[in-house]
Image: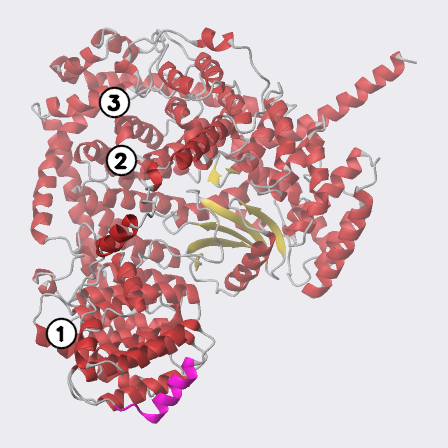
Amino acid sequence: MGSQGGFYQSKEFLDLVKSIGEARSKAEEDRIVLGEIETLKRRISDPDIPKRKMKEYIIRLVYVEMLGHDASFGYIHAVKMTHDDSLLVKRTGYLAVTLFLNEDHDLIILIVNTIQKDLKSDNYLVVCTALNAVCKLINEETIPAVLPLVVELLAHPKEAVRKKAIMALHRFYQKSPSSVSHLVSNFRKRLCDNDPGVMGATLCPLFELITIDVNSYKDLVMSFVSILKQVTERRLPKAYDYHQMPAPFIQIKLLKILALLGSGDKQASENMYTVVGDIFRKCDSSSNIGNAVLYECICCVSSIYPNPKLLESAADAISRFLKSDSHNLKYMGIDALGRLIKISPEIAEQHQLAVIDCLEDPDDTLKRKTFELLYKMTKSTNVEVIVDRMIDYMISINDNHYKTEIASRCVELAEQFAPSNQWFIQTMNKVFAHAGDLVNTKVAHNLMRLIAEGFGEEDDTADSQLRSSAVESYLHILGEPKLPSVFLQVICWVLGEYGTADGRYSASYITGKLCDVAEAYSDDETVKAYAVTALMKIYAIEIAAGRKVDMLPECQALMEEFLASHSTDLQQRAYELQAVIGLDAHAVESIMPSDASCEDIEVDKALSFLNGYIQDSIEKGAQPYIPESERSGMLNISNFRNQDHHEASSHGLRFEAYELPNQTVQSRIPPASLASTELVPVPEPMYVRESYQTTIVPSASSDAGSTELKLRLDGVQKKWGRQTHSSATSTSSSTSQKTVNGITQVDGSNTSNSRTRETYDSRKQHVEVTPEKQKLAASLFGGSSKSEKKPATGHKIPKPSSHVVEKSHARKSSMEIASEKKASFQQPPDLLDFGEPTVKSAAPSVDPFKELEGLLEPTTQVASDENHGSTTAAAKSPDIMGLYTETHAGIYDKDDSDILSGLSNPPVTNMFGGTTSMQVAQSSKGPNLKDALEKDALVRQMGVTPSSPNPNLFKDLFG
Amino acid sequence: MRHNPEEAQRHQKSESGIPAFEAPENPDFPFRLLSRMIHFVLLISRQGKVRLTKWYSPYSQKERTKVIRELGGVILSRGPKLCNFVDWRGFKVVYKRYASLYFCMCIDQDDNELEVLEIIHHFVEILDRYFGSVCELDLIFNFHKAYYILDELLLAGELQESSKKTVARLIAAQDSLVETAKEQASSISNIIAQATK
């Protein structure tokens, strides 16, 4: 095979790649690619090309498209290739179509039939390949064509197929939730698949489902906790270890899910404390993946109901991140800090210097993250420093996207925490002047409203002060060249409303300025329109006050220009202005009352003032108005539409053959009342076929399908679900029997925590800090706890009192955890049974735990609640655990060796033969060196990657 | 002054207040944002040459070229000691350099960057195992194989398999099956050819 260099393609292809590699410029590369496209166009339409040749052409098409050129002329050939019988060719075809086509491409309809056929193939590799394509290509319209097949594959004997089927179902759910909503219980079911890969894949859809609707999945908390516990205890096969961590990717996914489930739910959170605490303790903070898990733990802790011990562990982890030399870890530390300060704002203080270092770091990414943190911790005491820094940074960058974001944040903070009107106006001016047209127009409208309404609670003099300071600053700013349009609009509006309000500036001065604006920005119609309206307001105020209005000559010239403007909007405004000037004081007062922009305009929606007119018309013989809903013709049409729509949604495109009508009758099984077990996810291969049959029947029977999901659960082994029933009562019942064991454990971890704190504090004292930084820190973090006590005026900061309550509450709950720990011993951690071939309904005789389970729970679930509280169970449980772990370890070893032997089976592969374990792989690097040298020689010969000194790459990174 | 035409508009607009920063608007890329972990995978050489691209969210060919050009400019110019993460149009791009090749993955704002960094490394380790100390040349000439491997690792933008062994086994099975299928086909056709003689 081509694993050793793999230069088995034709000379032509090699030459192509080589010449692209040698291309000195983009233009040269484009020229080569265009030539290649011509060649391919010619060759590919030849009716009898040998398959092997065709396969290469398709790969060359992929190459061309990868380089950014259009290869759409060859798409149809890739589609054709998926029909081929040989997997080798078929695989290439599928690869090409998944790379070429988006889900809305017209050609997809041509592949659906092939996919259907391949999903039914008895070769699981064909099925896998087809499922890959399903995930990428099947769109909302074609889901019904493959859905039943995919559902059937959920029970496929090969774990790779089950895994991909889960992912495919997840994609269907994302694309069209309604088409698979009756199938979501499959995800729960697959959660207890024997294969950890399938279980891991199931976490993706479950995560999404839980994001959408947390409450329906609260019953799974204990299942997730128990899976996570088993993962951290290394119960999964060794193959899932990654850099000595047990299945870290699965851990991260589970922590994400727990964070959602525990958010704002004290009871659920309490179940998680132990396992999350364990991860904090066990996590290897020297490896990158270990830190990834730690970070996810912090996220989880800051999301679930607060627990003081965990918060402390999280704070420790954060300080380790922030002290690290790695920018990546600092970045994660800043992010994590931003999450944690929502719950415990006081921890920001001890990291103030680290935060300032990050703020001044040359790395933009880190800097931005730090700004995000500052944004989160802004309060009225530090708003000036933070916003000033943000604006400075905003001015310095070119990235418009981020500029917009940071500008809107500045505005938001300024609005929320502004210490004075003066400062607020100045800040807004800076933002507008520099971020100008990037700012969302909403921000401008908000600013106008703010100036108009004032700050609300204060008295009127403060408001008018705000307005006059705004007017003054705007008149000053108008002297500057080139202002952004949005800003000019605000200026014009404010000058129109309040320019003459305080009497400091005369009407003629303001109108002169407005005319200047309209002239200077003569290509901006919106600004001109704002200017005209502002002029009209000024004149209206003058007329209403009884003063004589004499229009400036430049203003008159401007009006004449606008009266003849091509813009009808400008014209209308100009005519309106003319009309207003001609009116008397009373009329002007009533059409344009002064400073009334904030008053509500009452709209008479019933148009009652027209009643008289209507009455007259009807008397004269006019037809009365018939409301739309009463018109019969319309009714029919809408009905028809509904029907049409209904039909479209019920079948749309039909891909399957018409089935026999009696099939549905067969699949109907009288619903049994199994409400107590419906939540238990149970793997049951038989069920899938049934639901498939029902899903073909549209609409009405989907209900029947969902009831059937609950069927046939008796006699099947229950795995992770059982604890969900016992969890609710076990916590409450066990609190009464606190054991010495649990309490001592708490003490032990407390001392260890305080020790780490000590070492941290002593280290902190050694750091030398420059005075400027200290000053900045003091202004940002408000120095010591002074700012902390100040009652915050903003809405952002949580009330301190409630926080204290929470804290004391949480402290109390830590006692509960101690006893809960005990309770969790007593709850049997379920077997994962990975690698066990089939589901057994009877417990294996070796397993002592299962025997006990039989004693404790005589079949019914409800009874188990009482049993769990019983003292006998509590007393016995530790012994059981011991036995259980022993036996389980035995099983596990056996499984693992199975997998190993499975892998090293001779027919598997050329390059994996015998190199399954890490040591062997290491030793086999020897001959590879030779390969690498050969490659190196070849590189030089071919001139690919000319500037890299040694293309023999990853060697040292992995050595 | 209630005569203002912009008045009504202003009142309407200010209802919703300041736009929240969690949902940055992306007028250039109006694709539907499904909750997926990875939006695309890019492999770029130090000279900015594309070695592999995989798009899990829909982008037109024009957008793709633009994305590659933009990101290439940002990432290739970054210093060695800086973060492996870059803010980009409201998304984050996590990248890692292996010799002369940059592996980049685009994720959402609130994803775990360190995890994605490890997914990249995981991918590289699998490539390394498959090709036997992989180098850029392997990927240049066997990019389609790199695609097959990526398809076993990520599916629809989600991490599909975290066990190296499982991925390796599946790829190996595909390769070997292809081989045996070829042999079988030729032997069967030989038999048929002989039988029909």
Instruction: Look at 22% across and 84% down and name the residue there.
Output: A472
Q: Is residue A552 magenta?
A: yes
Residue range (magenta): A550-563
Which residue is label 2 attached to?
A261
**Secondary element at image label 3:** helix
> How many numbered markers are drawn?
3
Whether callout 1 and callout 3 share a subunit is answered: yes
Instruction: Look at 78% across and 47% down and name the residue there.
Output: A40
Q: Nearer the viewer, mark 2 or mark 1?
A: 1
Residue A503 figure quarter: bottom left
Does B38 sit above or below residue A418?
A: above
Please state the horizontal and vertical placement of residue B161, each as a whole percent of the image. Answer: 48, 34
- Magenta span: helix, strand or loop, mainly? helix
Residue A182 in sight here: yes
Colour mapping used in the image: secondary structure
Cα separation, mark 2 vs mark 1, equals 47 Å
- Output the chain of dot 3: A
Which residue is label 1 attached to?
A463
Which residue is label 3 attached to?
A724
Cα separation, mark 3 vs mark 2, equals 14 Å
Does A413 sit above or below residue A811?
A: below
Looking at the rendered structure, the kind of residue marked 1 is: Asp
Looking at the rendered structure, the kind of residue marked 3 is: Thr
**Secondary element at image label 2:** helix
